[in-house]
Amino acid sequence: MKNEPQSGAYVIDGGFKLYGETEIMSAKNAVLPIIACCAAVRGEVRLGRCEQTSDAMAMLDILRSLGGKCRFEGMDIYIDCRGLDKHTVNRSLTSRLRSSVFILGPLVAALRKAEISYPGGCDIGVRPIDIHTSGLAALGVKLTEDGDKIVCDGRGLHGGETVLPFPSVGATENLMMAAMLCRGRTIIRNAAQEPEIADLQNFINACGGRVRGAGGKVITVEGTDSLHGTDYVPIGDRIAAGTFLIGGAMCGGEVTVKGADPSHLGSLTELLLAAGAEVTEYTGALTVSGNGKLKTVKKAETRPYPGFPTDLQAPVTAMMAAGEGKGYIIENLFENRFRHVPELRKMGADITVCGRAATVRGRRLHGAVVTAEDLRGGAALVLAALKAEGRSVVKDIYHIDRGYYDFDEKLRELGAHIQREKV
Ligand code: UD1
């Protein structure tokens, strides 16, 4: 995040159990591509249960810069892109979030042209966009680079078949959106299967599009002439839900998260059970309970969905660091996603990293002054601080604001001793 980070810190007194319920809102990773998709919708869209995370605000700013009208009313986002007529997104906007690349597909679909500066976002690895660009090329889009800009000429956009070399979430979504308004049929093979992709399909179809197969490995898009406005409620945020569940398991007590689908959290539930927490699943809710004395799980390895999500790797690292015993974490998705480890060490954690593997020996954690280096790593530091003995300060929490709204207030409602302070 290079753009106007709001400085701030969480001051946390650790060692308190968590009790109560927290309500999970629409998933950031579902909302972002859906907002981008609205660039190609000719009608008003209302998205329900949305929070003003800084990533969502940044994506709305991108639509505004292109001529779209967007506003928040309570928890609803209203978007009207009937007047959207610009196709260039400049660096000051794309540098705010990596997901700005999602705008390529909808712009190519709507205007047959797009131009964006290379996207920014969390510094968790190289994060190339070659799968996005080669997929777009397979649909007849001509791509050129102009300095740090990617320029798309979509006048030749047509349906086509493409096999992704890796099931990239963003590339799968971008291609679905590029294909939704072009002639013919598009087949995306080796597609990512994350629930947010099925949610994007459901949104496109609610606007009159014709997409099927999302959630599986093969997605078929039949191009249609136009998309109309709709009312839509994106799926609950499985990563936010997972973060609260891990916090409840680490601190002990009993925490219920409402508004998340337990079937989206199967890989985490397995880890929580292996660590010795109790998990109860309901329709649209989960409860975690225990005494806060966890075993360090033997191995947690990140994989594309339905495997264990990389976005919960850092919180699970914190959980393992505060458990009893030795375990391993393998990060297969991003090469630079252990930036929370040196910070956790300041709290007494015993973790060694070698390439994509981390060895964790559970220890009693103590309070420390630490710095969030990215979104989920920052959330992991908060969880570690809730568990640690004594006071911690987590700095640079603007990273956390990208994906968690009112994180401190929600944790306070569960009994955590956490305050947000300006520094
Ligand atoms: C999305 C999520 C992010 C999550 C990630 C993996 C959103 C808004 N973000 O990010 O929270 O951590 O999925 O589940 O939904 N890759 C390439 N070339 C490409 C695209 C990706 O090599 O063109 C690589 C990436 O560097 C990474 C892997 O593929 O190693 C997965 O990336 P991808 O699935 O695309 O993640 P995002 O869509 O960026």
Image (cartoon, rainbow, N blue to C red):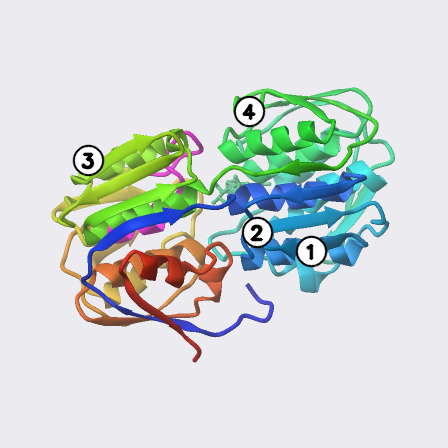
Q: Nearer the viewer, mark 1 or mark 3?
A: 1
Q: Nearer the viewer, mark 1 or mark 4?
A: 1
Q: Position of residue 257 (x, y in %)?
A: 35, 43
Rendered view: 73 above or below 154: below
| Residue 311 on the magenta span | yes
Q: Amino acid at mark 3?
A: Ala
- Label of residue 75 in the image: 2
Number of residues whose C-alpha sits closer than 10 Å to that of mark 4, classed few (under 14), some (14–19) or many (20 or more): some
Dividing the picture into quadrants, the one containing residue 394 is: bottom left
- Label of residue 274 in the image: 3
Residue in the image at 56% along x and 49% along y: 50
Rendered view: 346 above or below 225: below
For marks 1 and 4, the one nearer the N-term is 1
Q: Amino acid at mark 4?
A: Asn
Q: Amino acid at mark 1?
A: Arg
Q: In this figure, which residue is indicated by the disc labeled 1?
A: 71
Q: Could you tell me which secondary element the residue under label 1 belongs to?
A: strand
Find the magenta span and give its range: 301-319
- Label of residue 345 in the image: none
Q: Tell me if the residue at label 4 has its CB under 8 Å from ligand 1.
A: no
Q: Nearer the viewer, mark 4 or mark 3?
A: 3
Can see residue 331? no
Q: In this figure, which residue is indicated by the disc labeled 4?
A: 190
Q: Position of residue 325 (x, y in %)?
A: 12, 46
For marks 2 and 4, the one nearer the N-term is 2
Distance between mark 1 and mark 4 Cα atoms: 36 Å
Q: Are dots 1 and 4 in contact, CB under 8 Å?
A: no
Q: Amino acid at mark 2?
A: Met
Distance between mark 2 and mark 3 Cα atoms: 36 Å
| Residue 335 on the magenta span | no
